[in-house]
């Protein structure tokens, strides 16, 4: 074997250097930014200009193409699919809820058609049911992601709620139903309420107070009795008759009272269906409110409490003119016998009769509620122990206090579905009122000329005809 010479070593070194240079250039080329495509490259198919096609899950659409199809592109086969039956007819089939694209190309790679597919739940059944339920309404059903959106116009709020309930039942989840139905005109409800209350009370009081001195020899007996009337919380005004027997004075207090109180209120309120209206015929009484403060003395804080006849109602107009009505009625009055003293201020109590209910009535129908008869009887006997038990003579050492209260309350409610009217069809309490001229007021004692007529009266018009007294 021939030995390697110096010439061979130099040749080997040159080859290694060339290989290293080639590897270095390849590494630099790998780190370079790729060059942009040639300017003649163009987008063949895109969403711009594509036809929007809504599909239901499991539904299909037949598409006829202008030329023979060579290639089909489906972006997401899990949402929609395309089936070619002939060279120029294709079937688009909805597979799952979502959105995708489908493009058709001819043999030369040119786009024949593009479709933007939105696959939703099949809503035709829901549309048919809503159309059957509301033939006069205009309810639209549209898909919204994996839910449903209702829109359109109805005549009553109850119809909008009923459409929402049906859609929620068919969708299987109420949270996936968006209700954008607009009510053409919200119904207004006028409620006429009559509060009628009669209170009857009877009070009988009789008592004898003794005051004086009775002596026998060196024994002296001082007599001083005071028998209060406690059934009503304190003494009432009574008639006192005093009589003196030797050194003993007897005072007889007696009182009997019977009274009748009648309360009548007839409020009329109007509210939009679904809203609330309030009424109060009464007043407010002040009372000190409990508070905490860091300064001394604490500044007084006065609050107010309502009393009287109050009414709160919330109507909802249902189909066929029926009205669902939530009513809260209350009749309260001041009760001094139940008063308390707070921070040196006497605060009266309240006697309250309250009723709350929810009923369903036709327009113009009436309901009697909170009708009750309440009777309260108090009978107190106060006197000197043991002595008041003595027959006949025990009357001198006791008082008899009897109170009987009866209350009867009736509330009648009548709701109406009402519509606005022209101003000329409304009447005011002073329509037809005109001041009487001086001769009519002085000679005939008239305070006004005409009252309660619908036609307007000219106040400047003078009386005509004879007036004054007629003597035979």
Image: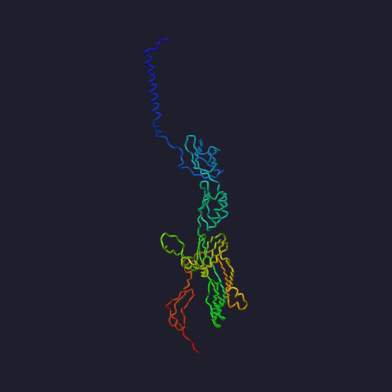
Residue lying at the far top in this picture: please name it.
1
Specify the quadrant that holds the N terminus.
top left
Image position, residue 135 (x, y; %): 56, 55
Residue at screen point 39% across, 30% down: 31
Residue lying at the far bottom in this picture: please name it.
472
Q: Nearer the viewer, residue 148 or 300?
A: 300
Q: Is residue 267 visible?
A: no
Residue lying at the far front in this picture: please name it.
218
Q: Nearer the viewer, residue 193 or 213?
A: 213
Image position, residue 184 (x, y; %): 50, 58
Q: Nearer the viewer, residue 261 or 326?
A: 261
Residue 405 placement: quadrant: bottom right
Does residue 138 lie above or below 91 as drawn?
below
Image position, residue 234 (x, y; %): 53, 72
Q: Is residue 118 visible?
A: yes
Residue 294 placement: quadrant: bottom left
In the figure, is residue 83 to the left or right of 293?
right
Does residue 244 lie above or below 195 as drawn?
below
Does residue 253 lie above or below 149 as drawn?
below
Image position, residue 136 (x, y; %): 55, 57
Coloured how? rainbow
Badge count: 0
Residue at screen point 48% across, 86% down: 469
């Amino acid at each position: 074997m021939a030995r390697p010479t110096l010439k061979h070593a130099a040749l080997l070194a040159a080859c290694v250097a060339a290989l290293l240079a080639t590897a270095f250039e390849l590494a630099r080329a790998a780190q370079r930014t790729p060059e942009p495509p040639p300017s003649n490259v163009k987008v063949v198919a895109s969403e711009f200009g594509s036809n929007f096609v809504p599909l239901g899950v499991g539904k299909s659409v037949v598409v006829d193409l202008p030329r023979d199809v060579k290639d089909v592109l489906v972006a997401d086969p899990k949402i929609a699919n395309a089936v070619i039956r002939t060279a120029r007819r294709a079937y688009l089939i909805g597979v799952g809820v979502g959105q995708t694209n489908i493009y058709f190309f001819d043999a030369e790679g040119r786009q024949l058609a593009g479709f933007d597919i939105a696959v939703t739940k099949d809503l035709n059944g829901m549309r048919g049911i809503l159309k059957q339920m509301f033939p006069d309404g205009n309810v639209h059903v549209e898909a919204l992601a994996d839910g449903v959106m209702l829109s359109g116009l109805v005549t009553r709020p109850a119809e909008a709620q009923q459409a929402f309930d049906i859609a929620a039942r068919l969708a299987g989840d109420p949270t996936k139903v968006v209700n954008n139905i607009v009510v053409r005109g919200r119904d207004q409800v006028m409620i006429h309420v009559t509060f009628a209350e009669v209170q009857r009370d009877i009070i009988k009081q009789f008592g004898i107070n003794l005051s004086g001195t009775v002596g026998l020899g060196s024994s002296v007996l001082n007599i001083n009795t005071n028998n209060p009337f406690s059934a009503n919380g304190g003494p009432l005004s009574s008639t006192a008759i005093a009589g003196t027997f030797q050194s003993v004075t007897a005072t007889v207090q007696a009182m009997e009272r019977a009274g009748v109180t009648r309360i009548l209120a007839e409020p009329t309120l109007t509210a939009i269906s679904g809203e609330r209206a309030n009424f109060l015929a009464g007043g407010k009484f002040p009372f000190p409110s409990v508070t905490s403060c860091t300064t001394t003395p604490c500044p007084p804080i006065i609050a107010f409490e309502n009393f009287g006849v109050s009414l709160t109602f919330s109507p909802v107009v249902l189909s066929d003119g029926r009205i669902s009505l939530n009513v809260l009625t209350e009749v309260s009055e001041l009760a001094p016998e139940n008063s308390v003293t707070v921070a040196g201020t006497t605060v009266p109590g309240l006697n309250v009769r309250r009723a709350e209910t929810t009923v369903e009535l036709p327009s113009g129908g009436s309901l009697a509620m909170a009708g009750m008869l309440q009777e309260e009887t108090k009978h107190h006997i106060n006197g000197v122990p043991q002595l008041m038990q003595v027959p006949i003579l025990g009357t001198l050492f006791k008082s008899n206090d009897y109170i009987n209260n009866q209350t009867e309350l009736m509330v009648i409610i009548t709701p109406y579905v009402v519509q606005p009217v022209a101003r000329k069809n409304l009447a005011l309490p002073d329509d037809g009122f005109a001041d009487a001229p001086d001769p009519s007021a002085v000679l005939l004692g008239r305070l006004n000329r005409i009252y309660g007529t619908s036609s307007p009266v000219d106040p400047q018009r003078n009386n005509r005809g004879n007036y004054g007294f007629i003597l035979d």
